[in-house]
Amino acid sequence: MLGNLGFGFLVVLAAALVFVCRRRAAAARELSVQMQKQMAREEEFAAVLRQLGQFRSVTHDVRSPLQTVIGYIQLLAAERAGELNEKQRDYVEKTRIGAMQVLAVIEKFQEIKVVREP
């Protein structure tokens, strides 16, 4: 049989093992929580990328008609369809500026590269 010293050593060893196991279990739980948060962030990011891809498709579909509108605005501004009065010139210029701003936004979205999901 074990003497008092041997039994005491086993008790201390068992307590130390329980302590280490509890700490590792706590660390594993914390790691699991962190991994779940990371997975949630990755899912959100993937959803944003999917939406961006859909938006890029829409911007492509909008760009062509917008280019046509800009062409007509330029024809009006050049007064090829007839002379414009001051108020008409002002409207044409405001429309041209707005159309060019929309085109610039569309081009910025077209420049964004979408990362493909694995």
Image (cartoon, rainbow, N blue to C red):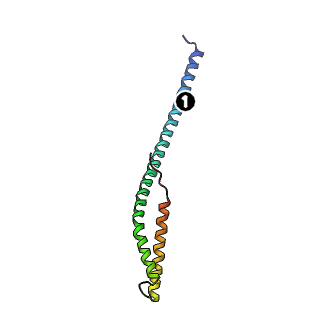
Residue 32 drawn above or below residue 92 = above
Residue 6 drawn above or below residue 99 = above
Q: Residue sitting at 56 percent across and 17 percent down?
A: 7
Can you name the residue that lies furthest to the right here?
5
Q: Quadrant of the C terminus?
A: top left
Can you name the residue that lies furthest to the front here?
80
Q: Residue sitting at 47 percent across and 84 percent down?
A: 90
Residue 116 is situated, as x and y percent measured from the top left of the image, at: 45, 50
The residue labelled by disc 1 is 20
Q: Residue sitting at 44 percent across and 75 percent down?
A: 71
Residue 55 is situated, as x and y percent measured from the top left of the image, at: 42, 60
Q: In which quarter of the image is the N terminus?
A: top right
Towards the viewer: 90 or 19 = 90
Which quadrant would residue 52 be assigned to in this image? Answer: bottom left
Circle 1 crowding by C-alpha within 10 Å: few under 14, some 14–19, many from 20: few
Identify the amino acid type marked 1. Answer: Val
Towards the viewer: 58 or 50 = 58
Towards the viewer: 84 or 41 = 84
**Total residue callouts:** 1
Residue 50 is situated, as x and y percent measured from the top left of the image, at: 42, 54
Residue 86 drawn above or below residue 13 = below
Indicate the secondary structure of the residue bearing disc 1. Answer: helix
Residue 68 is situated, as x and y percent measured from the top left of the image, at: 41, 72
Which quadrant would residue 58 be assigned to in this image? Answer: bottom left
